Every structure is written in structure tokens, then in C-alpha cells.
Image: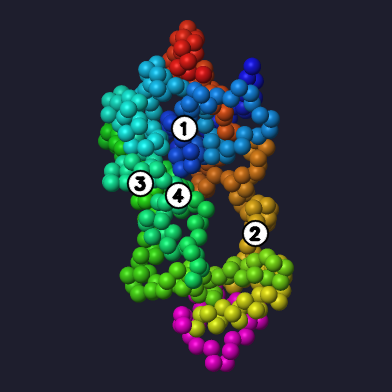
């Protein structure tokens, strides 16, 4: 027998999107991240999980998946006609639908844009894919590393003379994917509320990752970004935009690009440039200058350097691990990390002065709110019992 979900405190939604209702067809990665962002800003988000994903028993302790925070879950068999009808009933009153299947999958389920917009003409239909809804690669499998590789972004990340380094899955999945989808659906909801017409938002990670590199393309067009990987201003080519190891094996990050900030860094660290040092922006001299900075930072521990820099414009910060970051005084003061439902996790961002967002509720397990959501959608007790008996919902 599966245990019942713990009672959740009843709280009023908070945030600038409290008037927005989102239906999320369960997926992984960027789609859930977009839904989390919307939920953190106050949107009501209903997650449609697979009926087969309902756990037989609930593990002890906090829910492990923070990306699913802020919503309620209904477990539905989308391949059954009754399950499809339940989902369409939810969509009928929604502002947004989010789905992250390969192109054509929701159409085959009877939940494609034509089906959903036919029931709800003002619906914003948000689609999250890696390659996009069109193009010769649209049906191929892939992951973050593949999408950013195709855009040139991966080529640029890494040190000189070494192979490219995937920046975890932050650029494709979350920056170029989930954030772009969240931005796109909010923009489309604003338009739908003016025109009364919904539309499809095609959020592709190849498109989003490419947009994130716009500034670098601008530097290239101006002749500022001319080196190979790891040889430019912002990719560890410059000695004053670099990460250096310290005497204790820890690291400091240096970002003293502007002349006045560089001068402050030199003054506070005691760095002595060679008498014949050329202009610090001369890329031909960067390797030699970097060697001198490397030797200097190895003479003290990380925290000694941080203390020496103090509250200054030297643009010197410690490279913190996950635990250190959550307890850093500045991030503690801003409550950048908070504890919610027994888990320390990043707080909602950005901040709003009049309508602050927040984590609305803990992440649910699949099906935690099936009966509750069916009742709110208009199904009576007899209809709910019939749906459960048929396996259309769990």
C-alpha cells in the first residue's frame, strides 16, 4: 500500500504570475526547469506525470528533485483515450502548455497544437526540444553537449591547446533551453491576453545556446576575439581574467579587466610587473604575464588572498565549492540559498519588489494530487472512480 502524501501547508501564491495556469507534460531537464521558473514566480503549475511513474511507496526524507518544486501532480495514461480527454480538460482552462517530446509525439497522442488550440484558442503551446521542431536533425536524439557543439559554443570553452570542456549542462539545457522557454511563454501569454489568440512557442536549445553567444560574435566582428580557444579576453587567455591556484590547493578567480580595477589588483596583491612589461592588453605578452601571476598566487592560501583583497574593486573572489557557496556571507545576506522542505536549494530569481516570488510548495511525487485536481477540473466522485478503475489515472 502506498503511503499518502504528507499534508502541505496551505499558502497563498506569491509572485508576478499568480494569474497564469500552466499544464506541464512531464519530462526531464529544461522543460521542468522552465516550469519551475514559472512556478517560483507564482504561476499555478499542474504536472501531468505518467501513470506508470506513481511510486508504490514513498521514500523517507525530502523529495530529491528540486526542479519539480512548486507544482501539483496528476498521474495520467496519455496513451488511453480517457487519459487524453482528462489532459484536454486540464488544458481547456490553462494559459500555457509545456511539452518536451520529440516533434510529432504529442500529435500522435492527440495532444498536438491543433488538438489543444482547438479546445482552447488562447493557449500558449510551449515546445522544448534540442534541435527544434523543423530542420534535417529535428528527429534525432541528442543532449546538451551535442546542441552546444553544433552552435560553436562548446568549441570556445576550454584552455589553449586542450580539448573543449562541456560547461556541465548549463548552456544548452538550462540557459539556452529552459530559460528561453520560460521567457517565450511569458511573452506569448502577454500577447494572447491582448489578442485572445494563442500560439506555438518553438524553443530549441540550438537556437537558445546560439543567442547566448551573441556578445562573443560581436567581439569577433570587431576584431577583438581573434585567437583560438583559451587565447581571448574572456576565455582564460588574458592573465587578468583567469583562475589561479593558491598555496593550499584552492583557487581564486580574477576578473580585473578595466584599467582601474587592474591597478587595484596590482596594488593589493603586491604584484610587481617587469620593468619592460608591455601594454597589458597585448595578447602576445599574456602567457609570460600569466606565469608571473601564477607564481605570485602560489605564495599564499586562498583565504589569505581574499582577506588581502578585502572589500575592494580588485575583482578577486574565492572559487567556492557547493557547501562553501551556500554559507558565504554575501549569499547568506541575500538569501540566495534557502532551506525549503528540508533541503537547501537556490532561491527563486530574479527578485521583485512588489510581487515577490517564492518556492510555492515542495516537489510532488507522481500522482500526489490526482483526485484533488480532477475534482477541481469538474469530475465528480463517480467519474474519478471510473477513471481510476480503468487505469486512465492513478
Of mark 1 and mark 3, the one earlier in the sequence is 1
* Residue at 56% from the left image edge and 78% from the top image edge: 290
Q: Residues within 10 Å of mark 2 (few under 14, many from 20)?
A: some
Which residue is most to the bottom? 275
Q: Which mark is residue 131?
A: 3
Q: Which residue is disc 4 drawn over?
A: 144
Q: Is residue 378 visible?
A: yes
Mark 3 or 2, closer to the camera: 3
Tell me the magenta residue range: 256-284
Reading the chain from its start, which is encountered first: label 3 or label 2?
Answer: 3
The residue tagged with tag 3: helix, strand or loop? Answer: loop
- Nearest the eye: 185 or 109: 109
Q: The residue tagged with tag 1: helix, strand or loop?
A: loop
Looking at the picture, tell me which residue is in the foreground, 32 or 36: 32
Give the Cα separation between the discs numbered 4 and 2: 25 Å
Q: Position of residue 336 (x, y in %)?
A: 60, 50
Q: Earlier in the sequence, mark 3 or mark 4?
A: 3
Tell me the distance, in whole angstroms, between the alpha carbons under discs 2 and 1. 33 Å
User: Which of the two labelled residues, at mark 2 and mark 1, occupies the earlier sequence position?
Assistant: 1
- Residue 230, image x, y percentages: 48, 70
> Label 3: few (<14), some or many (≥20) within 10 Å?
many
Q: Nearer the viewer, mark 1 or mark 4?
A: 4
Residue neighbourhood size for the residue with mark 1, other residues' Cα within 10 Å, grouped as few (<14), some (14–19), many (≥20): many
Tag 2 residue: 320
Using the image, determine if residue 302 lies above or below residue 182: below
Report whether 167 appears left or right of 103: right
In the rendering, which numbered label is found on residue 26?
A: 1
Amino acid at each position: 500500500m502506498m503511503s499518502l502524501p504528507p499534508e502541505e501547508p496551505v499558502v497563498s501564491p506569491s509572485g508576478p504570475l499568480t494569474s497564469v495556469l500552466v499544464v506541464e507534460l512531464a519530462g526531464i531537464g529544461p522543460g521542468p526547469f522552465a516550469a519551475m521558473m514559472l512556478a517560483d514566480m507564482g504561476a499555478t503549475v499542474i504536472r501531468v506525470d505518467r501513470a506508470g511513474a506513481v511510486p508504490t511507496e514513498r521514500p523517507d526524507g525530502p523529495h530529491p528533485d528540486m526542479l519539480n518544486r512548486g507544482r501539483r501532480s496528476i498521474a495520467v495514461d496519455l496513451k488511453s483515450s480517457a487519459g487524453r480527454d482528462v489532459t484536454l480538460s486540464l488544458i481547456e482552462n490553462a494559459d500555457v502548455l509545456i511539452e518536451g517530446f520529440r516533434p510529432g509525439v504529442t500529435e500522435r497522442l492527440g495532444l498536438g497544437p491543433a488538438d489543444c488550440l482547438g479546445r482552447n484558442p488562447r493557449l500558449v503551446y510551449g515546445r522544448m526540444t534540442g534541435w527544434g521542431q523543423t530542420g534535417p536533425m529535428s528527429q534525432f536524439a541528442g543532449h546538451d553537449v551535442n546542441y552546444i557543439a553544433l552552435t560553436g559554443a562548446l568549441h570556445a570553452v576550454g584552455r589553449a591547446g586542450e580539448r573543449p570542456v562541456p560547461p556541465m549542462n548549463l548552456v544548452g539545457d538550462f540557459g539556452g533551453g529552459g530559460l528561453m522557454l520560460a521567457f517565450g511563454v511569458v511573452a506569448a501569454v502577454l500577447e494572447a491576453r491582448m489578442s485572445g489568440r494563442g500560439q506555438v512557442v518553438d524553443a530549441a536549445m540550438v537556437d537558445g545556446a546560439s543567442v547566448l553567444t551573441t556578445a562573443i560574435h560581436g567581439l569577433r566582428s570587431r576584431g577583438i576575439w581573434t585567437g583560438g580557444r583559451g587565447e581571448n579576453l574572456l576565455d582564460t587567455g588574458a592573465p587578468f581574467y583567469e583562475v589561479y591556484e593558491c598555496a593550499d590547493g584552492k583557487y581564486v578567480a580574477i576578473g580585473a579587466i578595466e584599467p582601474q580595477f587592474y591597478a587595484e589588483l596590482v596594488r593589493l596583491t603586491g604584484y610587481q610587473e617587469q620593468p619592460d612589461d608591455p601594454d597589458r592588453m597585448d595578447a602576445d605578452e599574456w602567457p609570460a604575464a600569466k606565469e608571473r601571476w601564477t607564481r605570485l598566487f602560489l605564495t599564499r592560501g586562498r583565504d589569505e588572498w581574499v582577506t588581502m583583497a578585502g572589500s575592494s574593486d580588485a575583482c578577486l573572489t574565492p572559487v567556492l565549492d557547493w557547501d562553501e557557496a551556500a554559507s558565504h556571507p554575501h549569499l547568506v545576506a541575500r538569501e540566495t540559498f534557502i532551506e525549503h522542505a528540508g533541503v537547501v536549494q537556490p532561491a527563486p530569481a530574479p527578485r521583485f519588489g512588489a510581487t515577490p516570488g517564492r518556492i510555492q510548495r515542495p516537489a510532488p511525487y507522481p500522482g500526489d494530487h490526482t483526485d484533488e485536481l480532477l475534482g477541481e477540473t469538474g469530475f465528480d466522485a463517480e467519474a474519478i472512480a471510473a477513471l481510476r478503475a480503468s487505469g486512465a489515472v492513478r
